[in-house]
Image (cartoon, grey):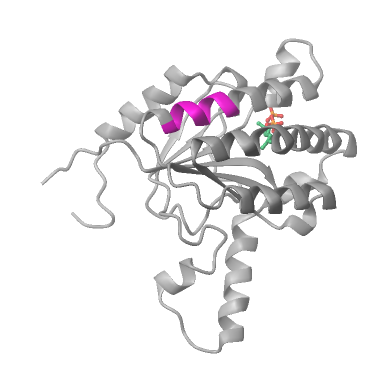
């Protein structure tokens, strides 16, 4: 029997297209990232307000760290602004912050801000905002495999999941990628095995709350079978 999906519990977003959004307006790429950050804040608030419990955002892949230093500096400075201004707000709203990825790949002061932000918001029960920075899906799986090898005994899927960066979080129900490309780009590879995929041509800064609602509506109409018939 076909079950209708309700609101997805966990939505993951690949926020692609900031650079192109800026270039189309003859602005520097940094302006696109700034606009992307603004959109990201409003979009995640909107997602929680419509009942999504986990929002995971791909802000920087491990591979993005080989972008030109000037662009990385812009992104790092946005991360600093974000963590210095928003941790308190998240705490006030009861939203737990989690950062996925290897903090050693980020500047030490940002890694420290993340540590404090995660600690300060750890009792949040109204929702979880996970931001992937310096994250790679393969790296995530490899580090879990290495830990499993260290433990020296075969693990089941649940035990294995608990070794990933997303430990304790449900798998994404819906993955949205903006910016026209249709690929996963080393995002949550293990975790997205049964995730519904939604691609939008809109560039991330132009992907509005109404666009998000359209994605939820489409999700609601999909039939999820998890390999069954
Ligand atoms: C991809 O667009 C986007 C990024 C690499 C960065 C996304 C970052 C933000 C939205 C700001 C995040 C801030 C915090 C605090 C998490 P692109 O630059 O690859 O765009 P393009 O494909 O058009 O070049």
136 relative to 74, above or below: below
Q: Is residue 96 magenta?
A: no
161 relative to 109, above or below: below
Residue at 52%, 26% (x, y): give it: 43
Name the foreground residue: 47 vs 227: 47
Instruction: State which image quarter holds ligand 1.
Output: top right
Residue at 73%, 49% (x, y): give it: 63
Residue 14 makes an appearance in the image: no
Residue at 46%, 56% (x, y): give it: 191
What is the residue that sits farthest to the bottom in this orientation?
A: 152
On screen, residue 17 versus residue 176, left or right, reads right
Residue 11 place in picture, x, y as percent: 44, 40
159 relative to 113, above or below: below
Within the image, what quadrant is residue 19 found in?
Answer: top right
Q: Main secondary structure of the magenta part?
A: helix
Residue 159 place in picture, x, y as percent: 44, 73
Residue at 19%, 38% (x, y): give it: 4
Range drawn in magenta: 41-48
On screen, residue 146 versus residue 211, left or right, reads right
Q: Quadrant of the C terminus?
A: bottom left
Name the foreground residue: 45 vs 218: 45
């Amino acid at each position: 029997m076909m079950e209708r999906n309700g609101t997805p519990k966990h939505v993951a977003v690949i926020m692609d297209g900031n650079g192109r959004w800026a270039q189309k307006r003859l602005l520097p790429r940094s302006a696109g990232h700034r606009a992307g950050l603004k959109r990201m804040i409003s979009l995640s608030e909107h997602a929680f307000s419509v009942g999504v419990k986990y929002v995971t955002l791909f802000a920087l892949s491990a591979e993005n760290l080989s972008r030109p230093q000037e662009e990385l500096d812009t992104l790092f400075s946005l991360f600093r602004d974000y963590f210095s201004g928003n941790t308190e707000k998240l705490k006030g709203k009861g939203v737990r912050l989690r950062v996925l990825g290897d903090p050693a790949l980020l500047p030490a002061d940002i890694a420290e801000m993340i540590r404090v932000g995660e600690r300060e918001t750890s009792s949040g029960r109204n929702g979880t905002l996970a931001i992937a920075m310096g994250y790679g899906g393969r790296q995530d799986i490899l580090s879990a495999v290495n830990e499993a090898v260290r433990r020296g005994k075969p693990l089941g899927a649940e035990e294995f999941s608990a070794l990933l960066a997303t430990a304790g979080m449900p798998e994404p129900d819906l993955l949205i990628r903006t910016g026209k490309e249709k690929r996963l780009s080393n995002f949550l590879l293990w975790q997205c095995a049964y995730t519904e995929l939604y691609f939008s041509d809109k560039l991330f800064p132009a992907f509005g709350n109404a666009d998000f609602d359209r994605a939820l509506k489409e999700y609601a109409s999909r039939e999820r079978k998890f390999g069954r018939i």
